[in-house]
Image (tube, rainbow, N blue to C red):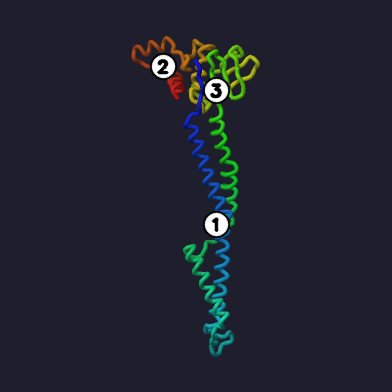
Amino acid sequence: MKVTTSFRRGPFAINLAFAVFCLVGAIWGAYDYWVAYPRIEQAGLEREEAMKTKQQLEELTGVSAPASGGAPIVGRALTDDETRRYDEAKATIKRIEDEFGGAPRKLAAYDRPLQLWLWVIGCGLLGFPFFVWPMIRMVRRKWTLEEDGSLRTPWRTIPLDQVETIDMSRWCAPTGSKRSTWRAWLVLKDGHREELDDHDYLDMHRIIGFYASRFHPEQWTAEAKRVKTAEEVEAEAEGTDPDASDAPEEAASGAADR
């Protein structure tokens, strides 16, 4: 019976969703850091300079009271050059306020560092590869159980006579890390351990079941389910639930079906 694993769509989709989120966040952060925020800062400086010019020229044409009292000082008419500068200042203010819906907001001291470190570096340089690499690994890696019982892994081929046993201590265990209950380990005669992960790879439980039923036939079936005890069989026949074996059996059944 030849069995070849393939990647599970669930873990792949989760990594893909996070990778897309990180990529979008990195693009957004890069745009803000190198495009949007510098434009806001530049527009703020231009508006501030235009407001200053406009105010200075308006003071030349207005009426003001002298500091020492007396008759008010009447302003003068603007020269042609001053009129041109005044019109340019008003046009600049209008253009900027139309573009930004008012005066450009002043950036906080943390705005640009936040976009750089959280989104560009955190999500882009670190987060995106962190989620893309498992997808590449899942697609490229395959385990194949050959007809003669040898196991072809992504790294080497393990003949059946080189396998000493299989460690099923965490497989479908009712306690401990849930992630580890999808795993078993081939123990080789040279002391090495080959991990078999049913969480990310479809049909891995059939490979696990092959070795488990061969080395521990009294405990495991070829589908990596626990062998039911006489008490469990009798309880099922009577239509009652066994006391102590419900949780392990349910866990084992679920693992084989997942």
Q: Are marks 3 and 2 in contact (CB under 8 Å)?
A: no
Q: Nearer the viewer, mark 2 or mark 1?
A: 1
Q: Secondary structure at mark 2?
A: loop
Screen quadrant of the C terminus: top left
Q: Secondary structure at mark 1?
A: helix
Residue 155 vertical position relative to residue 95 in the rendered view, above or below: above
Residue at left offset 57%, top offset 37%:
130
Q: Where does label 2 land, which residue?
A: 243
Question: Are there few (<14), some (14-19), or many (20+) residues within 10 Å of tag 2?
Answer: few
Identify the mark nearer the N-term, 2 or 1: 1
Q: Position of residue 93 (x, y in %)?
A: 51, 69
Q: Measure how far apart labels 3 and 2 are at the Cα level.
A: 37 Å
Q: Measure how far apart labels 1 and 3 are at the Cα level.
A: 49 Å
What kind of residue is marked 3? Trp
Residue 94 vertical position relative to residue 25 in the rendered view, above or below: below
Identify the mark nearer the N-term, 1 or 3: 1
Residue 229 as seen in the image, left or right of residue 167: left
Q: Where does label 3 land, which residue?
A: 143
* Res 199 seen here: no
Residue 68 vertical position relative to residue 21 in the rendered view, above or below: below
What kind of residue is marked 1? Ala
Q: Nearer the viewer, mark 3 or mark 2?
A: 3
Question: Are there few (<14), some (14-19), or many (20+) residues within 10 Å of tag 1?
Answer: some
Q: Where does label 1 land, which residue?
A: 36
Residue at left offset 54%, top offset 72%:
51
Q: Measure how far apart labels 2 and 1 are at the Cα level.
A: 65 Å
What kind of residue is marked 2? Asp
